[in-house]
């Protein structure tokens, strides 16, 4: 095995374990049954410690050993996992992460600066530990004594120990691996109750190669670990050794019982043995490889000859195999795909859609029925390919929400507040590009809610509120969009203070009448802040304007509602994808526009009083915009105009157009930077004819329809 590849796997595993450990630490206070999470935290630290030992990273082993010791006391019930200890463990997670990143950068030796950073943590951890007793040494026989070997082989009957037979390959040392590090790691899973070192393969001194390993071991091992966990100890050296693991005698009857009670369609001999725990996946692979050389020999016979499974266990599996009908076991497969390759696939699908639309147009113009049928079928297949490709880009938002848990945990303690974070909708999926870019805006909103929204405990008590504040994160799908809400039960926004600050900064004219939503929208102006004091979290007026700008760049919107004394809710609405959508084409004059189909409620014939910008839709007032006037398109309206009824975030507005052209798979092409200031347009697409159609920005259109006239709202000064 290549050591660099093994180390890269170790680093990746450590990062994932630390992420799981942090998530469990943050969630342990919110559950009543803590045992499962505490065990998960301990296992993560234990695995990092053991893996570090395999690579000779003694400084990491030393630090994580102390962490593991404290967690072991928590796991055994000797130490409560109180808030102060959770904070300490999170700090230890951060430090271990720093050590891992140092290894990733190639710094394998202890770094004095990092050791100095970790020293205060070790002191704090030491306060939770009793004085350590002197550890007893495991018995070690240094010669291949026959009596010693017999004692090792017989220990499983008397003491219920595992028996491990280990022979290292000659190139282990040459490949940079230390055989004794695996023995030390094995001791973290239990206790080596006896061991014989086999050195009969040693040549005469003058023939010895210092880079060649000649040793083997017979080990009696006392542990409650399963066979797979024990085999995992030797994972990085598996290609360089011969390993045989025999279970304690008491486990044989347990294996037989598990085989007899197995349910489902799993009936292959090797799979049954793996499932009951008597055989590991690697041992099964080795046996199957041996069977390929001797296909006439049954797998059970090979396993017994190799000494990996006891004969009575194999016999029980064969009996069980006869009782059920063998079926092909379904196997779940997943493949990691580079994000750039996925983006390239989406781009190619987009070009395929454009080319397909062009072919369909040509077929319709030619009037060949069979060709039109073929192109219609092709369009359906392309649509299925599009949907499948887009699903590949959809990822859950739970990773983003999990990162915010740490932000709330640390921020609440820095501010001296007790804040409970409640998360809903973490399984909601959206485009990976949106996920990557929404993290920072959400972090700003959460920090703002903690600092400015939720009051201190004494203030909340004076208002009759619970001392603990609540911050809620929620995500859900709505009409082709994803909606994310950040809601707090704090003091809410002071409308009059916001107005006074806006007038002071000359953002609005004194006496200008604004509704609540327009007043609250002012806090998203650059540099706007009503904070009376600054904190390291917020208060400088930097952040919310960036939040709005970043969300707008994703073709999303952000709205704020608040009730003074009750709380504030920020609603972020984003498109599910930034690549391909179902669109609806409309025509005004000779210009063609595309509207996202999910935001269209219906189409009706145009009826309105002269000079009115609204109509009656089944007894309700529907404001509308005439696209011809909005974009200054020359010519007179055609007879039989239509109104496209738009619905976005519960608000309705109409769009007056000349002609309805129908549905169209729309490949979104972003506009150049020089068109960033163009209002009511969010992008462009290419039609089958090769012409360009502009994609309308529905949220901007609805906002414009709600304002008086077709001109944009002008209460904010440029």
Image (tube, grey):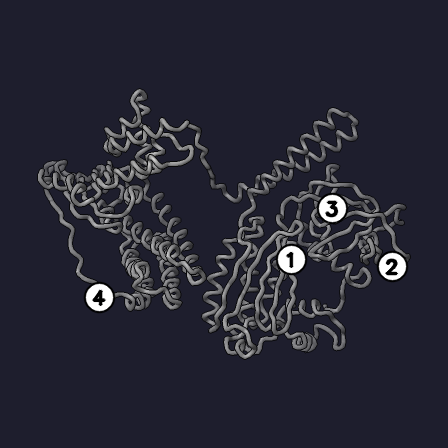
| Cβ atoms at labels 2 and 3 below 8 Å apart | no
Residue 98, quarter of the rendered image: bottom left
* Mark 3 vs 1, N-terminal side: 1
When the figure is inspected, residue 448 is found, relative to residue 191, above or below; the finding is below
* Mark 2 vs 3, N-terminal side: 3
Q: Is residue 114 left or right of residue 164?
A: right
| Cβ atoms at labels 1 and 4 below 8 Å apart | no
Estimate how packed mark 3 is, as few (under 14), some (14 to 19) or many (20 or more) residues with alpha carbons within 10 Å: many
Q: Which residue corresponds to the image point at 58% horizontal and 64% vertical from the top-left?
A: 487
Which quadrant holds the C terminus? Answer: bottom right
| In this rendering, the label closer to the viewer, 2 or 3 | 2
Q: Measure how far apart labels 1 and 4 are at the Cα level.
A: 59 Å
Estimate how packed mark 1 is, as few (under 14), some (14 to 19) or many (20 or more) residues with alpha carbons within 10 Å: some
Q: Measure how far apart labels 2 and 1 are at the Cα level.
A: 31 Å
Task: From the image, tell me which residue sits under label 1.
Answer: 552
Q: Is residue 684 left or right of residue 40?
A: right
Q: Which residue corresponds to the image point at 58% horizontal and 49% vertical from the top-left?
A: 430
Where's residue 705, x and y in %? 78, 59
* Mark 4 vs 3, N-terminal side: 4
Where's residue 262, x and y in %? 37, 36
| In this rendering, the label closer to the viewer, 2 or 1 | 2
Task: From the image, tell me which residue sits under label 3.
Answer: 594
Which quadrant holds the N terminus? Answer: top left
Task: From the image, tell me which residue sits under label 2.
Answer: 612
Q: Which element type, helix, strand or loop, lies under badge 1? A: helix
Q: Is residue 328 left or right of residue 544?
A: left
When the figure is inspected, residue 325 is found, relative to residue 58, above or below; the finding is above
Residue 111 visible in the current orientation: no
Q: Which residue corresponds to the image point at 68% horizontal and 35% vertical from the top-left?
A: 355
Residue closest to the far top:
296
| Cβ atoms at labels 4 and 3 below 8 Å apart | no
């Amino acid at each position: 095995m290549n050591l660099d590849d093994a180390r890269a796997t170790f680093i990746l595993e450590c990062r994932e374990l630390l992420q799981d450990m942090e998530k469990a630490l943050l969630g342990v206070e919110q559950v009543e049954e803590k045992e499962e999470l505490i065990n998960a935290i301990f296992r993560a630290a234990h695995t990092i410690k053991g893996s570090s030992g395999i690579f000779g990273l003694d400084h990491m082993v030393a630090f994580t050993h102390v962490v593991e010791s404290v967690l072991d006391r928590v796991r055994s019930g000797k130490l409560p996992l109180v808030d102060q200890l959770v904070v300490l463990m999170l700090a230890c997670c951060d430090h271990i992460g720093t050590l891992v990143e140092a290894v990733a950068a190639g710094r394998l030796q202890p770094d004095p600066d990092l050791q100095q950073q970790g020293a205060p943590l070790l002191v704090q951890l030491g306060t939770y530990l009793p004085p350590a007793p002197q550890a007893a040494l495991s018995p070690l026989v240094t010669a291949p004594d026959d009596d010693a070997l017999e004692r090792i082989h017989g220990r499983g009957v008397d003491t219920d120990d595992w028996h491990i037979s280990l022979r290292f390959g000659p190139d282990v040392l040459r490949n940079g691996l230390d055989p004794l590090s695996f023995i030390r790691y094995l001791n973290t899973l239990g206790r080596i109750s006896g061991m014989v070192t086999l050195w009969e393969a040693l040549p005469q001194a003058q023939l010895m190669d210092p880079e060649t390993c000649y040793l083997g071991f017979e080990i009696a091992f006392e542990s409650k670990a399963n066979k797979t966990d024990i085999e995992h100890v030797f994972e990085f050296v598996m290609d360089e050794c011969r390993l045989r693991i025999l279970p304690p005698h008491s486990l044989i009857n347990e294996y037989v019982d598990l085989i007899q009670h197995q349910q489902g369609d799993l009936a292959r001999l090797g799979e049954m043995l793996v499932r009951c725990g008597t055989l590991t996946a690697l041992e099964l692979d080795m046996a199957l490889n041996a069977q390929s050389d001797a296909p006439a020999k049954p797998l059970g016979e090979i396993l017994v000859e190799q000494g990996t499974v006891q004969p009575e266990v194999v016999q029980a599996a064969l009996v069980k195999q006869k009782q059920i009908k063998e079926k092909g076991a379904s196997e779940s497969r997943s493949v990691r795909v580079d994000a750039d390759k996925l983006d390239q696939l989406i781009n190619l699908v987009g070009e395929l859609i454009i080319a397909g639309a062009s072919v369909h147009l040509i077929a319709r113009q030619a009037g060949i029925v069979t060709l039109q049928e073929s192109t219609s079928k092709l369009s359906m297949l392309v649509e299925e390919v599009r949907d499948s490709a887009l699903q590949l880009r959809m990822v859950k938002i739970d990773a983003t929400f999990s990162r915010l848990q740490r932000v709330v945990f640390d921020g609440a303690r820095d501010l001296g507040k007790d804040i409970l974070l409640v998360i809903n909708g973490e399984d909601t999926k959206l485009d990976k590009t949106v996920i990557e870019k929404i993290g920072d805006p959400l972090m700003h909103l959460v920090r703002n809610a903690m600092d400015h929204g939720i009051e201190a405990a004494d203030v909340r008590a004076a208002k009759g509120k619970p001392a603990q504040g609540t911050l809620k994160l929620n995500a859900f799908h709505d009409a082709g969009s994803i909606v994310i809400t950040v809601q707090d039960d704090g003091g809410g926004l002071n409308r009059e203070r916001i107005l006074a600050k806006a007038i002071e900064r000359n953002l609005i004219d004194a006496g200008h009448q604004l509704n609540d939503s327009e007043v609250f929208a002012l806090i998203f102006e650059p540099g706007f802040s009503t904070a009376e004091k600054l904190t390291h979290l917020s208060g400088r007026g930097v952040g919310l304007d960036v939040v709005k700008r970043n969300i707008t760049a994703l073709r999303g919107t952000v709205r704020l509602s608040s009730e003074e004394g009750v709380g504030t809710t920020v609603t972020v609405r984003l498109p599910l994808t930034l690549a391909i959508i179902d669109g609806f084409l409309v025509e005004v004059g000779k210009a063609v526009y595309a509207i996202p189909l999910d935001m269209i409620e219906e189409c009706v014939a145009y009826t309105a009083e002269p000079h009115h910008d609204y109509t009656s839709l089944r007894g309700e007032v529907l404001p509308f915009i005439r696209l011809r006037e909005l974009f200054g398109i020359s010519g007179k309206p055609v007879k039989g105009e239509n109104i496209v009824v738009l619905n976005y975030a519960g608000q309705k507005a109409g769009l007056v157009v000349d002609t309805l052209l129908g549905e169209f798979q729309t490949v979104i092409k972003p506009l150049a930077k020089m068109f960033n200031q163009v209002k009511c347009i969010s992008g462009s697409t290419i039609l089958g004819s090769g012409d360009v159609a502009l994609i309308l920005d529905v949220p901007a259109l609805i906002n414009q329809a709600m304002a008086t006239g077709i001109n944009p709202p002008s209460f904010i000064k440029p």
